[in-house]
Image: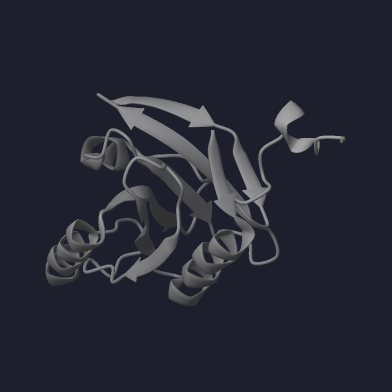
Amino acid sequence: MLQIRRDLVDEIVAHARRDHPDEACGVIAGPEDTRLPERFVPMTNAARSPTFYQFDSMEQIRLKREMDANGEEPVVIYHSHTATEAYPSRTDIQLAQEPDAHYVLVSTRHADETELRSYRILDGVVTEEPVEVVESYLFSHTGADDVPDRG
């Protein structure tokens, strides 16, 4: 399951709408070993295409260096589909190189509707996963430990 803050979802959708009719793309980095998306990093689609995305190579190198220096990893890799549903294409599946990343797709095919879905892609196998949008990671989990001790 992908747990992601609402402000980050809003950033993904806004980026996708801004770049439409071309596909938008980017990364949300997070501290290593936490699996929590924290830092929104919109990337330039070097392909400038409505049917394909490719990170700008210089931006990608810079981002890799920043993440290494900050102890971060790519938690979410996102892009938009401009005319189809938010489901990975054959090309998306072939290009998926981060086995631990959540691949988030947003469809901008309908101006008045947002379709955002998340997938794990490993060895060519696509598995859709639930998306939990939260206001904050601080109190987003549920369970018995949420109940304050009575003293």
Q: Residue at x 61, y 50 (%)?
A: 115
Q: Is residue 142 above or below residue 48?
A: above
Q: Residue at x 49, y 55 (%)?
A: 83
Q: Residue at x 72, y 34 (%)?
A: 142
- Foreground of the two, 108 or 5: 5
Q: Position of residue 15 (x, y in %)?
A: 47, 71
Q: Is residue 63 above or below residue 51?
A: below
Q: Quadrant of the C terminus?
A: top right
- Foreground of the two, 8 or 72: 72
The number of numbered discs placed on residues in the rendered structure image is: 0
Instruction: Please tell me in which quadrant of the rendered image residue 7 appears.
Output: bottom right
Residue closest to the far right? 150
Q: Position of residue 146 (x, y in %)?
A: 75, 37
Q: Position of residue 56 (x, y in %)?
A: 19, 68
Q: Is residue 127 above or below residue 101?
A: above
Q: Is residue 143 visible to us here?
A: no
Q: Is residue 102 visible to us here?
A: yes
Q: Residue at x 68, y 59 (%)?
A: 113
Instruction: Please tell me in which quadrant of the rendered image residue 101 appears.
Output: top left
Q: Quadrant of the N terminus?
A: top right
- Foreground of the two, 146 or 41: 146
Q: Is residue 96 left or right of residue 151?
A: left
Residue closest to the far bottom? 18
Q: Position of residue 105 (x, y in %)?
A: 47, 49
Q: What's the image's color scheme?
A: one colour
Q: Is residue 105 left or right of residue 43?
A: right
